[in-house]
Image (cartoon, grey):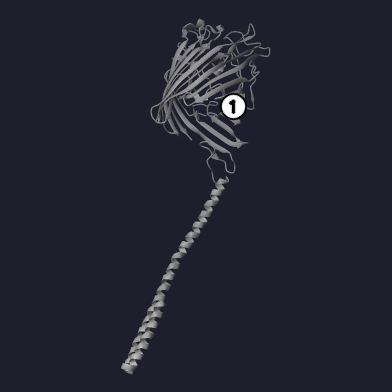
């Protein structure tokens, strides 16, 4: 519009000037020609102005067309942001639509609660080959290595394949009054045996069932008389003899920091394990009643552990009451083969102590190499040492004097773990036990007597390419010495039990090779 106004003013001035000059110098025809020319110029300018307005309208229309999608996109972006904000708010509040990380590794929060849970475990398959045959099948049984001269010792070459060690784990943690309430439930498949003909069935077996809050643990787990953190690693399930036994039993345990370390005290489920004792079986809803064991008081255990950057040390002790009461009749079990049956009452105090340690030696690719050692022993300590004959070597009942005697035993284990690199490691383990059996066990048939000493050596190579995958191969060598007449090297076999046999040595060796693959979840 400014251009148009300027042109009009210019034209008017020119016209006025032309008229004035035309009066003095030109004719009417010339003036008319000038007017026509100016009029044409004004019309051309008007046409240009109209075209300019059309261009402006076109540009405005295009601009509006481009702005419309941007507005829609902006509206959609605003709506998406609102949805995201709402979702974040729901997650923060524990919405049932989302899961968040829990309070301990591998756990997640149950929606709309403050409880963290972890569901895990592993599937493990094992291939076991025993060149000597008959040494326990899927697990080692060093206390029953066949003695030379027996029928079992004549067997060779046995192979077993099993998946029974596979495990299920459920754990939880819930804040309660400023502390964490923790539960642990675990099971494996070493329960009642099936058969190998068709299904190879195995019953699920309870391993751990505990609840813990403010240091008070109640339930079933491994005995307090053990160093759980100085354990040795084997591919084979039972692990080395000589260490404080990994007994799992019901207990009430309390842990508390005392001085520079941690003190734990426990009342644990008792059971007699003297010679001739009958162990109650677990049935649905109840236990069978023993015909001679009298469990009068719980076993009492205590442990104190001190940790530092170099490792840790622990001392521990156990006190137990051993009692027999046949109710005035002869029990079905005999102290000595062919001898008088247990009949009467008696009790004895038993127990013992132990110490353990773990020392870090060096690191390889961020992995700790370490040396560990454990020792335990006592009078009447019995089943609390791995490898001491379960159910027979805590003591014996003397029918003549009606006295229950305790017996001494001790054991130790040393082991070294060496990481070759970040994925390969080796464990070398040695274990030994010794039991002082009573003189009446020097009978004519050494095969019925308990063991005097046991030894084992484990050497393995384990590959751990990822936290979820572990494979290993292992060689195990076992040595058994049974108590014979006057602890001699050779004893005569009773003709009534083994007609035609000549002699049985009381010392035997056994070995096994095992491959295991474990997949964690």
Count of all numbered marks drawn on residues in the image? 1
In which quarter of the view is residue 275 placed? top right
For the point 35% across and 88% down, which residue is it? 17
Estimate the x, y position of residue 122 in percent, counting from the top left: 49, 32
Residue that numbered label 1 is attached to: 256
Say which quadrant the N terminus sits in: bottom left
Estimate the x, y position of residue 353 in percent, counting from the top left: 55, 17
Instruction: Please indicate, yes or no, whether residue 72 appears anywhere in the rendered image.
Output: yes
Instruction: Please indicate, yes or no, whether residue 385 appears anywhere in the rendered image.
Output: no
> In this image, 466 relative to 169: left or right?
left
- Asked which secondary structure carries label 1, the reply is strand
Q: Give the residue at the far right of this rendering.
A: 328
Estimate the x, y position of residue 492 in percent, counting from the top left: 49, 6
For the point 58% across and 33% down, which residue is it? 182
Q: Is residue 272 above or below residue 466?
A: above
Instruction: Judge the density around disc 1: few (<14), some (14-19), many (≥20) Cα neighbours within 10 Å.
Output: some
As rendered, which of 74 and 511 lies closer to the eye? 74
As rendered, which of 202 and 409 lies closer to the eye? 409
Q: Is residue 177 above or below residue 420?
A: below
In which quarter of the view is residue 283 placed? top right
Estimate the x, y position of residue 10 in percent, counting from the top left: 37, 82
């Amino acid at each position: 519009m400014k251009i148009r106004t300027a042109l009009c003013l210019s034209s008017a001035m020119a016209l006025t000037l032309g008229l004035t000059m035309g009066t003095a110098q030109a004719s009417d025809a010339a003036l008319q020609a000038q007017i026509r020319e100016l009029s044409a110029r004004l019309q051309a300018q008007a046409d240009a102005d109209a075209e300019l307005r059309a261009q402006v309208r076109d540009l405005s229309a295009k601009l509006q067309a481009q702005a419309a999608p941007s507005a829609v996109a902006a509206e959609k972006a605003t709506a998406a942001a609102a949805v995201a904000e709402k979702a974040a708010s729901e997650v923060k509040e524990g919405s049932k639509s989302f899961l968040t990380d829990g309070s301990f590794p591998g756990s997640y929060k149950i929606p709309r609660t403050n409880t963290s849970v972890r569901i895990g475990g592993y599937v493990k398959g094992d291939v076991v080959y025993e060149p000597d045959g008959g040494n326990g099948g899927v697990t080692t049984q060093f206390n029953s290595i066949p003695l030379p001269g027996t029928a079992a010792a004549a067997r060779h070459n046995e192979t077993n394949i099993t998946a029974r060690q596979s495990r299920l784990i459920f754990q939880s943690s819930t804040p309660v009054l400023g502390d964490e309430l923790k539960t642990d439930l675990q099971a494996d498949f070493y329960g009642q045996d099936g058969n190998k003909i068709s299904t190879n069935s195995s019953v699920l077996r309870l391993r751990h069932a505990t609840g813990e809050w403010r240091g008070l643990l109640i339930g079933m787990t491994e005995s307090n008389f053990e160093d759980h953190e100085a354990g040795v690693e084997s591919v084979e399930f039972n692990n080395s003899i000589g260490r404080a036994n990994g007994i799992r039993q019901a207990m009430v345990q309390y842990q508390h920091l005392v001085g520079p370390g941690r003190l734990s005290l426990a009342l644990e489920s008792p059971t007699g394990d003297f010679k001739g004792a009958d162990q109650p079986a677990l049935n649905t809803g109840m236990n069978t009643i023993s015909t001679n064991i009298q469990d009068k008081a719980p076993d009492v255990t205590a442990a104190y552990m001190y940790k530092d950057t170099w490792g840790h040390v622990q001392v521990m002790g156990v006190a137990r009451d051993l009692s027999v009461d046949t109710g005035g009749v002869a029990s079905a079990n005999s102290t000595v083969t062919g001898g008088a049956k247990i009949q009467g009452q008696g009790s004895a105090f038993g127990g013992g102590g132990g110490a353990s340690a773990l020392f870090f030696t060096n690191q390889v690719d961020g992995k700790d190499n370490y040396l560990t050692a454990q020792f335990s022993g006592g009078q009447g300590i019995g089943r609390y040492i791995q490898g001491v004959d379960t159910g027979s070597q805590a003591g014996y009942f003397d029918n003549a004097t009606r006295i229950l005697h305790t017996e001494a035993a001790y054991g130790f284990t040393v082991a070294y773990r060496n990481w070759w690199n970040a994925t390969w490691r080796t464990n070398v383990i040695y274990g030994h036990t010794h039991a002082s059996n009573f003189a009446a066990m020097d009978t004519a048939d050494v095969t019925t007597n308990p063991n005097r000493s046991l030894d084992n050596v484990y050497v393995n190579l384990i590959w751990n390419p990822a936290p979820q995958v572990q494979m290993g191969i292992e060689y195990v060598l076992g040595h058994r010495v049974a108590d014979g007449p006057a602890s001699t090297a050779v004893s005569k076999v009773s003709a009534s039990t083994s007609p035609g046999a000549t002699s049985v040595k009381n010392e035997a060796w056994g070995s096994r090779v095992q491959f295991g693959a474990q997949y964690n979840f």
